[in-house]
Amino acid sequence: MTSTPFTIAVSDDDVEDLRLRIVRTRWARDLGAPGWAAGTRASELLRLAEYWADGYDWRHHEAELNTLPAATAKVAGESVHYLRFDAEDPAALPLILTHGWPSTFLELTRLAHRLARPGEFGRNAPAFTVIVPSLPGFAFSAARPVFPTDVPTHELWHLLMTVELGFERYGAHGGDLGAGVTTRLGQAHPESVVGIHVLAVAPPLEVDNARVTPAEQAYLDEEVAWNANDGAYQHQQQTRPMSLAPGLSDSPVGLLAWILEKYHAWTDGEGAGLPASFDDDFVLTQASLYWFTNTISSSFRPYFEHGRGLSVPVTRIDVPTAVAVFPADLGRPPREWAERTYNVTQYTEMPRGGHFAAREEPDLLADDIRSFFVPLKQAR
């Protein structure tokens, strides 16, 4: 075992440097476009930046983060940061939850608590031991030392779960980038992964257009429209991430603008602000985690690797798979589309929620994960 307890300790100099950088921001000239039409709304960004510099208490949130069950471990020579939420039942099925972008481990804590301690949230239901790692190069997991990587992320996760933590069998959940990691876990290690629960699916390698259903065609048309209207960030991060990263690494307001626009566009809400679950302190703690660890550039790496064709291809997933589709997520694949690649045994259309479901709708998501994995646990 290489795991050691982990404590966040940002220096006073770094906290003060952040404040001064915000205060000294040279603000972009507004284009005059209404609301969020041209990107991050200037008035909302200004309001949050002023609070970040004068009012937001990093030390309070740092102390709260340090109450989480955090550790780091050396896995295949890389330092991996993770949280471990133990269930009351020592025989509980372990689950590994993987976040996406622009997220951190913090986004998954509400979900993890509900899965590990359901009784505290009014659920008389089986509990799970939950592992929440930080993706490589995100927050407190070390950035990849070489390019291309020697060990893909799903293999790091498998080594973390089986070798480091000693779990012979486990389940996995993920959305966004985490859905890709989770998918590849199920594909590579069906001997250990009892099932996967995902919020997004990999496309089939080949599609016969003559056999595409109307629902699939509607989904594909929506994907084309989304890429044209909303996919510029992804294209930039896939193709020229290091032309973008220096500005975001030097300007906290620039970093906040890049993240904030996604929180507005990808959540289930209307109007000028964000849903109630994305309160100011949560948004600024997420931004602070990226800022203090200087990891916005390394968070782009999975996009760049994918753009270079370095991601492990997804062919066929035979382990039992659950797909949960949230109405305000970036894509809403119909069941038959998912079944082209996955062994779908549970498919749920959620009544509300968006891309950051673990934060927006943790009860809905926890219940869906539980309904999928409880029968698989009993069948182990």
Image (cartoon, rainbow, N blue to C red):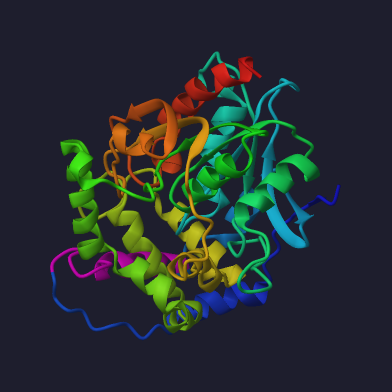
Q: Is residue 369 above or below residue 102?
A: above
Residue 327 visible in this rendered orientation of the protein? yes
At a point 30% along the width and 33% down the height, the residue shown is 336
Residue 66 visible in this rendered orientation of the protein? no
The residue lying toward the viewer, choosing from 298 and 66, is 298
Along the horizontal axis of the image, is 59 left or right of 320?
right
Residue furthest right as drawn: 1
At a point 67% along the width and 45% down the height, the residue shown is 83
Q: Is residue 353 above or below residue 41?
A: above
At a point 46% along the width and 52% down the height, the residue shown is 282
Q: Is residue 165 above or below residue 22?
A: above
Give the magenta-colored segment's residue range: 34-52
At a point 55% along the width and 24% down the height, the residue shown is 373
Residue 378, x across and y down, in percent = 62, 15
Residue 100, x across and y down, in percent = 48, 53
Along the horizontal axis of the image, is 175 left or right of 209?
right
How many marks are shown on the rendered structure? 0
Q: Is residue 236 above or below residue 89?
A: below
Classify residue 312 by image quadrant: bottom right
The residue lying toward the viewer, choosing from 230 and 252, is 230
Classify residue 354 by image quadrant: top left
Residue 128, x across and y down, in percent = 63, 27
Residue 113, x across and y down, in percent = 58, 33
The residue lying toward the viewer, choosing from 54 and 90, is 90
Residue 2 falls inside the magenta stretch = no
State which quarter of the image contains the C terminus: top right
